[in-house]
Each structure stands twice: as C-alpha cells, then as structure tokens.
Amino acid sequence: MPDRLLDAEPTIRLAVFLGVLVAMMMWEIAAPRRRQEMPRVLRWSNNLALVIVDTAILRLVFPMLAVGLAVMAQAGGWGLFNVPDWPGWVTVVLSVLVLDLAIYLQHVMFHAVPALWRLHRMHHADTEIDATTGLRFHPVEILLSMAIKLAVVAALGAPPVAVLIFEVLLNATALFNHANINLPRRVDRVLRLVMVTPDMHRVHHSVIPAETNSNFGFNLPWWDRLLGTYRAQPVKGHLGMTIGLERFRDRRELWLDRMLLQPLRGPASGHMLDSEAKQGEGDAMPGGQPPREG
C-alpha cells in the first residue's frame, strides 16, 4: 500500500492542483470579489513561471519529499506515532492537525525574523491577490519550508496517507483562500469557522502592517483564533483596502527576475518586530463587526 501510494502521489497532487487552479480562475473571471487593475496575463504568466522554477529547484535539492519520507519512517518504525500502537485514524487526524499547526508557526516565524521576512515578503509584494498569489513564493522559502515539513514528518512518524492528505489540502486551500472570488457573506461567516476563507486571508495581504501580521492560517482557522492573531475584517473593507506592500509597487516588480531579487533589495521593514509596523495596530480591527461596504 505505501509503495502504491508513493507511485500515485504525483498524479493525485497534479490532478487536484490543476483542477482547483482552473476552477478558481474561472470563478474569478465569472464573479470577482475585487476589481483588478493589473493585466491577468502579466501576473498569471510570471506567477506560474515561478511555480516551475520552485518545483525544479525543490526536486533538485530534495530527492525525497514529505510522502516519501513518511513511507521510510513507517517502514523503519521512526517517530512518535510508530512507537506505541496508535489507532490508524487517530494518527491520520493528529498528523494533519500537527502539520497544519507547524505551517502556521512557520508562517509566523517568517513574519517575525527579518532575514526570513525578506524571503516571504515576495509573496506579499503582489499588488493584486488571486489564486496565483497562493503559488508565489521565493525558491529559498520553498526549500526552507520543505526542510521544516520533513523534520515534522520524521519526528511524528506521520502515516504516508496523512501526509498526502495534508499536502493535497494545503495546496488546494492555498489556491482557494487567495482566490479573488465573491463568496456570499453568509457562507463566508459559516465556512471560516472550519477553514480559512478568501475574505479571512485577504486581510493578511493588506498594505497595513498590523493587518499583514495577522491571519496566518492557510488551511485551518483555529490557530489564529486560539493564539490571538485573528482579525475579522480589514479596517478599510475588502473593496477599499490596498493589497501588497509599500515597496515594490511598480508594474516591473511583477516580473519573475525582479521577484527573485526582491529579498536582496531595500530594508527588511514591515515584519512583526518592526516598530513602524506596530504603529498601525490601533487602526486594524482585532475582531467584531466588519465595515459596511458594497
């Protein structure tokens, strides 16, 4: 079973990825949440080109990825869940939850450590937000993220099926919660109780640092609520908010070559420990009622 799962992993992940990506793109065209000023062809072509670069570098540096390591851990009896005789469904559920928490904490760390923020801010420098923004990560950040994920998988001894479920969920929800889709407000209020919605995550891409440094969850919304990083709505509303960073707002910055060089350019301002970034804390809404908008 583990060998068959390992063989099927690329097909399963690619099929879900392409299916969700195409569905979100079509939804964005049919019913967008916000009007976008930048041409889709410019942003989509460069963001998708970055995916190709990231994938090639990841495969070159890590010959074995998370599901493969999980198969090895299960065969060798490594990790927490391979020591006692845990029920299968318990190890799957706990593995998915712990991996999701690890990604949340990693995300917070990339906002808090200036050197890591230099890498991660490329994701935030997109001046629009749509499904392709969920794919826009610097190759070095992708490598560091995979190293952290592999360490968690090895420590847990997570079952291969749990790791595959988590990877598929993470990719699909990243596309969904970055999508520029007009989800009905009542649906959003209910859905964000169990998963991160586009309106919830869009706050995280606000140009206001206090809002940028909130809503870190990609898949499950509970960590933000439990650990005090949740903000219900942007202070200027979803139609009035500005997406991106104060820096890197020129159209030329959306090209692949400029994106790859952004970590080396300018100060690492806007991270969680930046005193200037904290000045907007009083402006952003920690919860409560959303602003009225059309």
Image (tube, grey):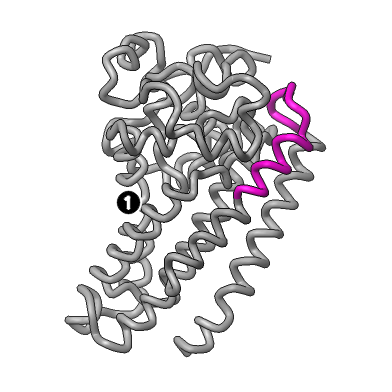
Question: Would residue 139 be found to the left or right of residue 275 on screen?
Answer: right
Say how many tags the image has: 1
Q: Does the magenta portion include 46?
A: yes
Q: Amino acid at mark 1?
A: Leu
Looking at the rendering, which quadrant does residue 212 occupy? Answer: top left
**6 in relation to 225, above or below:** below
Q: Magenta segment range?
A: 32-50
Q: Which residue is mark 1?
A: 101
Q: Quick check: 121 above or below 64?
A: above
* Nearer to the camera, 74 or 65: 65
Tell me what residue is drawn at x 59 percent, y 67 percent.
13
Tell which of 19 and 136 is nearer to you.
Answer: 136
Q: Residue at x 38, y 19 (%)?
A: 210
Quadrant in the picture for residue 39 = top right
Q: Residue at x 58, y 47 (%)?
A: 135
Across and down, in percent, residue 129 comes to 62, 32
In this image, 142 relative to 42: left or right?
Answer: left
- Dot 1 lies on which element? helix
Between 169 and 108, the one nearer to me in the picture: 108
Quadrant (top left/top right/bottom left/bottom right) for the C terminus: top right
Q: Nearer the viewer, residue 159 or 272?
A: 272
Taking the image as shown, residue 187 lies to the left or right of residue 228, namely right
* Residue in the image at 45% along x and 27% along y: 265
Assess disc 1: are there few (<14), some (14-19) or many (≥20) residues with their C-alpha within 10 Å of its C-alpha: some
